[in-house]
Image (cartoon, rainbow, N blue to C red):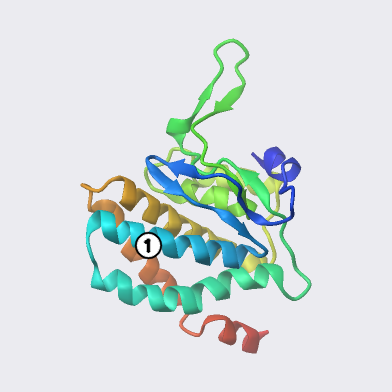
Amino acid sequence: MAKLHRSATSPNGKFGFDVTTFHGNTPIEHGWSNTWEKYFTRTTKVLFELEQEAQGYNEEIRELMVPFFSKVVPRLLRPLETGGRSIQPSLIHGDLWHGNASTDSETCLPIIFDAASFYAHNEYELGVWRQPWNKIDERYRMRYYKHFPRSQPEEDYDDRNLLYATRVNILDSILYKGDPGYRKMLICSMKRLVERFPGGLEAWKASH
């Protein structure tokens, strides 16, 4: 995966994709954005609306969305592309869990399938690796970083991973309408991030 992320980069230098892709049966209209923060914000807001349609209106999620987008997202994503730092849009699988990976019986090489690809921050790939049900887990994340080092600022890497896992929770809550567990995971991760970064980007700037 690290080799893919390094070699397959966006043809126009932007984040997104030029065709609709699917997470299960959920269509994702990517479009293009000049920054990762803009792409993430724009498309994640759409996914929240789809989640509310799928699972029903939830006041707690609605309230958490305000600081989530005004505080958490800028705090964790804008430092990736400011202060002389930059990230390259990488082609990712987009939904790499153990059910979408196997081994070729003849060559013994790993194979992956059922992709939901787009050009993203490479670390977004690892969001689904945080999920408790995924056998591609923390061990794989740590090994991945040996081949593709954490983005700067490095101290934010685990919180970024939680942010990306939160978006995975939104997608799964949309997909599994009859299972309230994914919505509970979504609310839990949103709360954790909102509580962790009440001061948002402004507090980070002040401390740096």
Q: Residue furthest top?
A: 106
**Quarter-of-image position of residue 201:** bottom right
Tell me which residue sits at (64%, 39%) in the image: 1
Tell me which residue sits at (32%, 52%) in the image: 173
Q: Quadrant of the C terminus?
A: bottom right
Q: Is residue 97 left or right of residue 183?
A: right
**Number of other residues with Cα within 10 Å of mark 1, as a class: few under 14, some 14 to 19, many 20 or more:** some
Q: Is residue 156 left or right of residue 98?
A: right
Query: Which type of secondary structure does the marked residue at label 1 adopt?
Result: helix
Which residue has dot 1 on it?
Answer: 48
Counting every numbered tag in the picture gives: 1
Q: Residue furthest bottom?
A: 206
Percent x, y of residue 180: 22, 53
Indicate whether 193 appears above or below 125: below
The answer, for residue 59, to whether it is visible in the render is: yes
Tell me which residue sits at (69%, 57%) in the image: 14
Percent x, y of residue 145: 65, 49
Indicate whether 108 appears above or below 141: above
The answer, for residue 195, to whether it is visible in the render is: no
Indicate whether 115 appears above or below 208: above
Percent x, y of residue 63: 32, 77
Nearer-the-camera pick, 94 or 17: 17
Tell me which residue sits at (27%, 58%) in the image: 53
Percent x, y of residue 162: 48, 60
Nearer-the-camera pick, 64 or 26: 26
Amino acid type of the residue that numbered disc 1 sits on in the rendered structure: Phe
